[in-house]
Amino acid sequence: MRPFASLTEQEILALAISNEEDDARIYQSFAEHVRGDYPETAKVLDGMAGEEAGHRNMLFDLYREKFGEFLPLIRRADVRGFIKRDPIWLVKTTSLETISDCVARMEQEAGAFYQKAAEITRDASIRKLLNELADVELQHEDTAHKLSAKHLNENARTSEKQTHKKKFILQYIQPGLMGLMDGSVSTLAPLFAAAFATHHNWETFLIGLAAAIGAGISMGFAEALADDGEISGRGNPIIRGVSCGVMTAIGGLGHTLPYLIPDDVPNAFALATGIASVVVAIELGVIAWIKAKYMETPFWRAAVQVVLGGLLVFAVGILIGSS
């Protein structure tokens, strides 16, 4: 890789032209990614892409004047420490917040590039254009704000926030909550049945661990295979499956871990069971809170549903283990 300071003025302009072309395509890719759900934001990004295309044309006009039509092949990857961009295929998993942060970073990095390029350029006209572009890029956020003000009125912003919230709930909260409920409740019966049948912490822990991990794997695959998300809008099935599976395992492990208390500790079984019972209460409370906050279920109703189901499973485990 070449150091930036070793570039000729011709190479600097060629690199700047390539950079503007790439950034315009990135903005356009962002716009196409969000156009279906956030059409007004897509218009903002279209405007940003147009700005980058205009910069490219300004640079190319100056390049033709100085060096003719031939454009040497020099890429970002050829220059040490030059601007890096994430692979564009990551756009498919990019949120609005991430896009906003990426746009701001791209503008700042481009401005810094033009400033540095102007410092090592001797040609007055090239230096003048680079300095002008540096100012434009560093002030590009103002352009974005103007475009946002034009396209993103209050109703549009409210609509986009509601759409984003709905997608977030469908893709992350709902499968995660389903997994947490299954892990926290379904593993109660085998765990406490084993506890009261053996009165040994280590054996109980192994059974609880197996139940939690097994339930996590089962729920993860079930969620991922149930819906590809194309029609329902529930998003990437792999992300949903991982979310559901991990939360299922966490729900089961929470009340399993207390049984790691060694059996040779005085009153080890009673201590572990007491802590596990407290953990169960906390888990059920968290589930009720999530249902109330994200699923628009009144807290008292969610608490009754979750606690009643949890207590029934809890009691079944104890009864079976004690018989």
Image: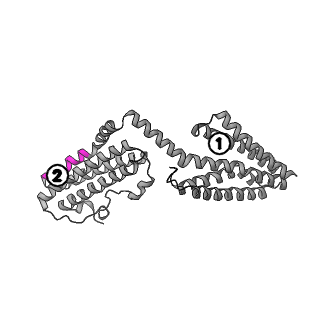
In primary-sequence order, the first of circles 1 and 2 is 2
- x then y, percent, for residue 90: 42, 56
Who's the residue at 78% across and 55% down the image? 201
- Above/below status of 155 relative to 274: above
Q: Left or right: 49 with respect to 302?
A: left
Query: Hey, what amino acid is under mark 2?
Result: Arg
Q: Main secondary structure of the magenta part?
A: helix
Q: Is residue 267 visible?
A: no
Front in this rendered view, residue 322 or 80: 322
User: Which quadrant is the N terminus positioned in?
Assistant: bottom left
Who's the residue at 32% across and 63% down the image? 77
Front in this rendered view, residue 240 or 209: 240
Front in this rendered view, residue 281 or 34: 34
Q: Left or right: 204 with respect to 160?
A: right
Considering every residue shown, the one lying at the far right of the view is: 323
Q: Which residues are magenta?
A: 124-136
Q: Residues within 10 Å of mark 2 (few under 14, many from 20)?
A: some
- x then y, percent, for residue 72: 21, 65
Considering every residue shown, the one lying at the far left of the view is: 65
Q: Quadrant of residue 67?
A: bottom left
Residue pointed to by mark 2: 127
Who's the residue at 77% across and 49% down the image? 272
- Above/below status of 72 relative to 134: below
Secondary element at image label 1: helix
Residue pointed to by mark 1: 287
Q: Left or right: 82 with respect to 235?
A: left
